[in-house]
Amino acid sequence: MTNYTHWFIRARLKTRQLLLLVALAEEGNIHRAAQVLNMTQPAASKLLKDLEDVLEVSLFDRLPRGMRPTWYGETMIRHARVALSSLNQAHEELEALKAGRFGQVSVGAITAPGLMLLPPAVALVKQEHPSLRVALQIETSDVLMERLSQGKLDMLVARLFAQHDKADLRYEVLTEEPVSAITRPGHPLLNVANLGLRDVVSAGWIVPPTGSVLRHRFELMFQEDSLEAPVNVIETSALLFMTKMLQQSDMVGVVASDVARYYAAHGIVSILPMSLPCHMDAFGIITRTDRLLSPAAKVMLKAIKASAVTVYGSRFDTAVAD
């Protein structure tokens, strides 16, 4: 017979203790945390002390002006966030089912697959399950990875970098990502024959922020050609600003080639006829191995993979479960 006497049952762990841990992490003060949870400060202090007594560790350092999580506290806070997020999702799924809806799924993506892969995938899902609620977030890989770890997203189409904790993650590569230089239609550089880096080094550039992978490789590209990296730059990751700025200036932007082709197809920008010898790392589908996907999430994952075969020519191991 299976033993279901888990430690948290023996400890009589309360949901309000989980809520208190998260509130303390966000407020840094037990008085404000108690107010957020609509309880008295003595009651909040007792909840925390009871939990620390059971765990036999100190979860917070008591400071003159507040409270700071210990390493033990950071661990419990992280798992408390995940547990509470899972409970919220369970409630939302139940409400959706009671209302006759199929459920909901939350997907995160970086910009290029957000433009090229997710629209056909979501269209496929909606065709088969019109009532399935799809929430999509377009962000950087770092932001998306954090939200996945917190249980706020079911799956990602993003990159894994060295700094990311890869434990409990499944990564299925989709494609590498070349980049292109874009300008306004009618830009003088569009008429330059055999366009090369020396022709564009003195141009004004709209580039990703310092510290990003693409920014590093953009500057390295010029240095490897014995050129100084452009100094007349605007730093931004906002595509709406970039396209508007390009339309009213002679600046040049650097973006993923899929993004460049999307805006060029709509006549918003033109792609410079040159090959940039730098590229972004490959991106892929990222899911958690320590959490079961909901029926709605499984439907979304299947649609993403089906669309990836068409968009990128991707192949998947059929032994990997949806």
Image (cartoon, rainbow, N blue to C red):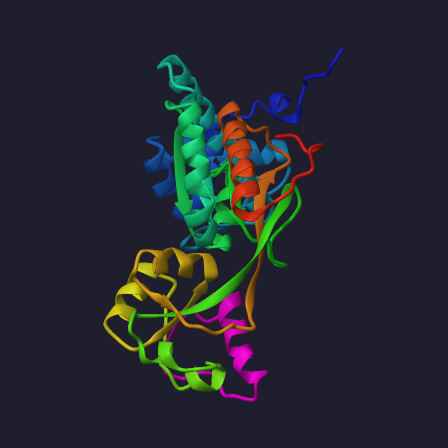
Residue 129 or residue 164, whichever sits in front: 129
| Image spot of residue 34 (x, y percent) | 37, 36
In percent of width and height, residue 90 lies at 47, 23
What residue appears at the point 32 percent right and 37 percent down from the top-left corner?
A: 35
What residue is shown at x 41% (from left), y 61% (from top)? Answer: 260
Quadrant for the N terminus in the image: top right
Does the magenta segment cover residue 166?
no
* Residue 112 seen from this side: yes
Look at 43% across and 53% down and name the residue there: 111
In the figure, residue 235 lies in which quadrant? bottom left
**Which residue occupies the foreground of this view, 187 or 215?**
187
Where residue 298 appears, as percent x and y from the top left, is 54, 28
| Relative height, residue 1 to residue 75 (above, below) | above
- 174 relative position to 269: left or right: right
Vertical placement of residue 294 versus 59, above or below: above
Q: Is residue 154 above or below residue 240?
A: above
Q: Is residue 206 magenta?
A: yes
User: Along the line of sight, which residue is nearer the eye, 106 or 29?
Assistant: 106
Position of 11 relative to 275 (above/below): above
Residue 46 in view, yes or no:
no
Q: Residue at x 57, y 85 (%)?
A: 225
Considering every residue shown, the one lying at the far left of the view is 248
Q: Nearer the viewer, residue 33 or 77?
A: 77
Looking at the image, the residue that sits furthest to the top is 1
Q: Position of residue 13 (x, y in %)?
A: 55, 26
Residues drawn in magenta: 205-233
Image quadrant containing the C terminus: top right
Residue with the most extreme right position: 1
